[in-house]
Amino acid sequence: MSESAPDVEPLIEPRPGSTPMAARPPRPRYRKKRWWAVGLGLLLGAATLYLVMRTNAGIAATFAVQERYVERIEREFESIPILSDDEIALLRRSRNARHVELAETFGVGPPDTRAEADSLGDRYGFVTIGTDSLYTVLPGEYSVPRLTPSAAASLDSVAVRFRERLARRGLPPFRFAVSSVWRTGADQAALRGGNVNAAAGRSSHEYGTTYDITYNPTRYSPAPDALPPPPRVDERVPGFLRESVREQLVEQQAADLDRLAADYPSRLTAVLGRALIELEDDGVLVVVRERIQPVYHITVARRLVPRPE
């Protein structure tokens, strides 16, 4: 009885001259998990792109509201008629003699020096005026920023009437600039050397009743604390960016309004001039639109605040 051959797979000898087959590499065990990672990355990338596009669209929509607001304001400015010749004539009906007469009646002084002005101002309760929400006060070498209470009240009336006229047209609050206020005799004498409008005799500026409002094109400015709120930030802007976008809107609003003031000074001057005509008709003040210097020269025309004794 022959022995049975072992149960072994016979070796297959390679043919002469042939190259032995390389061992087959093991099959990757994590290929399926790699495809999941790629898919997740694509999904996150798509989500991020969507959020970025949505955010950008929200920011663009927010600033588009501001742009439309500025376009509307520009159209409204362009619709304001400039001052007519008749209106300019009304702004020149009260000559210098009338201003001095009223100043002598309702003012004090005139002081010769700043020390005298300080003493009189303190005694009669003069109001110190400065830049605020209603107007700006320009620094002046030949002027003390103080007025009698009635003159200060008339200045406030001009600012309020000016702003009311703007508001009726849907325009934002702008401020005018006060360029000269109370002068001493020494101030007036020094000013005559360089200002052809400075009166040769007594000036109403020497009594604390008179001020000049300039209408130089660069002198109008928006009142920051009285502006309408900027546009609402679009809901597509995520919460963590809203405050930053809101700050940019406020800056853009200020820049837009500064530009509008520089672009439309004659329209703002027309609104201011009509407010002054109304107040002169009401007996609150008298005004003369000076011919060489770009100012409205204004004197209070009646006692608006009781004079302290």
Image: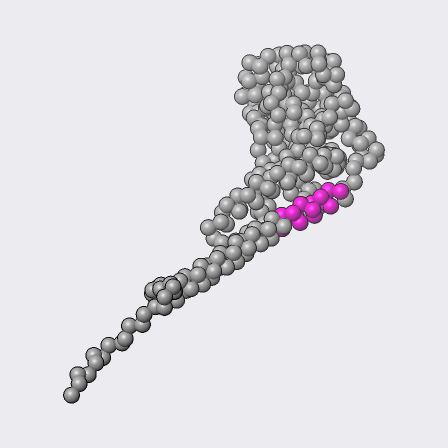
Q: Nearer the viewer, residue 237 or 210?
A: 237
Compared across the picture, whether 84 is left or right of 165 comes to: right
Residue shown at 61%/35% (left/top)? 134
- The picture places residue 276, in percent across and down from the top left corner, at 72, 34
Q: Which of the 4 image quarters holds residue 218?
A: top right
Any magenta on residue 77? yes
Q: Is residue 217 visible?
A: yes
**Residue 157, image x and y in percent?**
65, 35
Up the image or down, 222 lies above or below 142; here it is below
Viewer-proximal residue among 213 and 242: 242
Q: Which residue shows up at 58% across the image and 17% down it?
A: 117
Q: Indicate the quadrant where residue 114 lies.
A: top right
Q: Is 99 placed left or right of 23 in the picture?
A: right
Q: Which residues are magenta?
A: 65-78
Q: Nearer the viewer, residue 33 or 176?
A: 33
Residue 255 location, x and y as percent? 61, 38
